[in-house]
Image (spheres, helix red, strand yellow):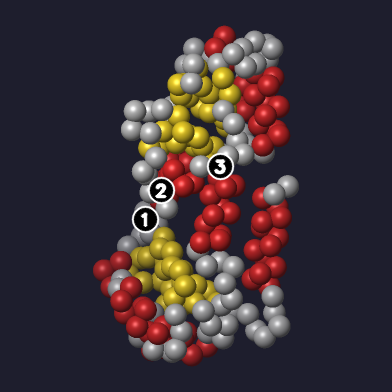
Amino acid sequence: MKALELISEEIPPLTHTDTGEKALRWMDEFKVSHLPVLKNGNFVGVISESDILDKLNLEDTLDKLFDHLPRPYVFENAHIYEVLAKISEHKLSVLPVLDAEEKYLGCTSIHHLITLIANTGSIKESGGIIVLEVNEIDYSMAQIAQIVEGNNAKILSSYIMSPSDSSKLEVTLKINKIELGSIIRTFERYDYVIKASFQKSEGDDDVQFRYDALMNYLNL
């Protein structure tokens, strides 16, 4: 998915003539701690709740309160991975999206992204999860998929983490089977380390319950 497709219509930008008081009120209303600021329709920067709270007179306009604002953003054709990386780098709750001429198009929020990822990453699908630990040099998704498919199952989604202080990878697999015993045993025969597994027994809705609880929390 590209950044243009990730824009949330729910979060409006502030203008340079808005007050710090209004900015805080909007942040509370939209459950974010950052908002984009425009001046004459042009993107000026991103303002944070903590920066506003450091000011004494919140009735002043933003252009009086701030001489300069940070300008983190992504272009409209940026991949969702780049969007997530930028949000993580700058610790943002909201990230502006600009076109090639740096015209403001809208913004996306971490809440909106989590909801999209949950709906597109097969999290809601029935199945189980296996977390593998493999040496980086030995990693082969082709072999991993072959093991899973050899047990009449499919990988619905996968995620790889690579700790900076380690030569090992942590590979998380969402699989379309509830009972993972045979798949785990096959991985073990191929000398894979199983760091964790999460599977539902018949009638156990724990995974769905946890997902629903997360979504309810985010919507508070």
50, 75: nearer the viewer: 75
| Residue 129 shown left or right of residue 26 in the figure | left
Q: Is residue 76 above or below residue 54?
A: below
Which mark identifies residue 1? none
Q: Residues within 10 Å of mark 2 (few under 14, many from 20)?
A: some
For marks 2 and 1, the one nearer the N-term is: 2
Q: Residues within 10 Å of mark 3 (few under 14, many from 20)?
A: some
Where residue 170 sits: x, y (%)?
42, 66
37, 186: nearer the viewer: 37
The residue located at (41%, 60%) in the rendering is: 161
41, 38: nearer the viewer: 41
Which amino acid type is shown beneath numbered disc 2? Answer: Lys
Q: CA distance from mark 3 to mark 1?
A: 36 Å
Q: Are marks 3 and 2 in contact (CB under 8 Å)?
A: no
Q: Provide the secondary structure element on which disc 3 rests.
A: loop
Which mark identifies residue 2? 2
Where residue 110 sits: x, y (%)?
55, 45
Q: Circle 1 is placed at which residue position?
A: 165
